[in-house]
Image: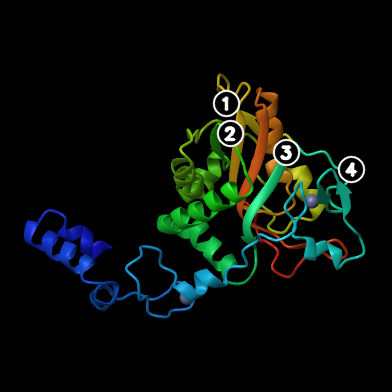
Amino acid sequence: MTARLTFEKRPFEKRLVAWLSGAGDALVSVLFPAGCRLCERVLLSASTVPICEECLGSFPALGGAACETCGQPLAAWSLGRGGGEAVGAGLVCPECQGREYGFERARSYALYKGALVRAIVLLKFERVEPLGRWFAERLAEVARREGIAADVVVPVPLHRQRERERGYNQADLVARPLARKLGLPYRAVLLVRTKPRPDKHILSLEERWDSVRGAFAARPGSKVDNLRVLLVDDVMTTGATLDACARALRGAGAKSVIGLTVARAARHPAVGFDESKPRDAR
Ligand SMILES: [Zn+2]
Ligand SMILES: [Zn+2]
């Protein structure tokens, strides 16, 4: 990338790079060699996403039978002790039975497992924007498949302090291009996190719910009246963060909130989370 940027102002080299791009992916990869950030295979395509096709293809995408409310795949709970219960047209997992969320439903692109865990780390700590755009394409596909209709896209915010330390909000890297792909207005600062998350890295399920309760607020004067909000985040663990954000949005007048995340923790009713539990949801 740096090499290409230094060419910017020189017309001959600009033409050369344009010609190279047209000359095929393999040639570009010879001249601009780079390894996959997850497995170190040489990247053979000129894509700006620094992850190889094999790794991208290994992400455990969701799409089969799932909980109507939280999107938890059916296989994750039907193997455990609790059975699903038919509610209306769909099934509701044991976690969601008898639970009231601020959001209408939540859906995710894939399970938080394997190579996807490390890809999320790249998004979260290294600001790999092309990866954010790639995830946004996947979420646009999920939104279409699930028939999700919305009026506005809003990212789950970081606390001011955290955003200053990190320099950006990882949810923004996905939510902004997603809004563009869906042709919807984007409101990056509609929600604010008023209570920082605790320093402790691993929180129990109950602690997670406690730590985000009342932690978000709609910015005074923000216009969400009667809007259907698409709320976007990188990882959904218990649903507590999406729930707290959705409650703040509903309190500010939003008509409905649907959560959409890149990944979701695989939960098993008998054992809680699987071995790849997120070490730090935000
Ligand atoms: Zn790879
Ligand atoms: Zn559920």
Q: CA distance from mark 4 to mark 3?
A: 14 Å
Q: Would you call the spot at circle 3 few (<14 residues within 10 Å), some (14-19), or many (20 or more)? A: some
Relative horizontal placement of residue 210, taking residue 21 as reference (left or right): right
- Circle 3 residue: 104
Q: CA distance from mark 3 to mark 2?
A: 21 Å
Report the quarter where the N terminus lies. bottom left
Foreground disc of the pair 4, 2: 4
Residue 219's disc is 1
Q: Would you call the spot at circle 2 few (<14 residues within 10 Å), some (14-19), or many (20 or more)? A: many
> Amino acid type of disc 2?
Val
Q: Earlier in the sequence, mark 4 or mark 1?
A: 4
What residue is drawn where x is 83% and y is 50%? 92
Q: CA distance from mark 2 to mark 1?
A: 6 Å
Q: CA distance from mark 4 to mark 1?
A: 31 Å
Q: Nearer the viewer, residue 81 or 193?
A: 81
- Circle 2 residue: 192
Q: CA distance from mark 4 to mark 2?
A: 29 Å
- Circle 4 residue: 98
Q: CA distance from mark 1 to mark 3?
A: 22 Å
In x, y percent, where is residue 214?
72, 34
In x, y percent, where is residue 231?
60, 40
Q: Would you call the spot at circle 4 few (<14 residues within 10 Å), some (14-19), or many (20 or more)? A: few
Q: Earlier in the sequence, mark 4 or mark 3?
A: 4
Q: Earlier in the sequence, mark 2 or mark 1?
A: 2
In x, y percent, where is residue 184?
48, 35
> Amino acid type of disc 3?
Glu
Question: SS of the residue at dot 1?
Answer: loop
Q: Earlier in the sequence, mark 3 or mark 2?
A: 3
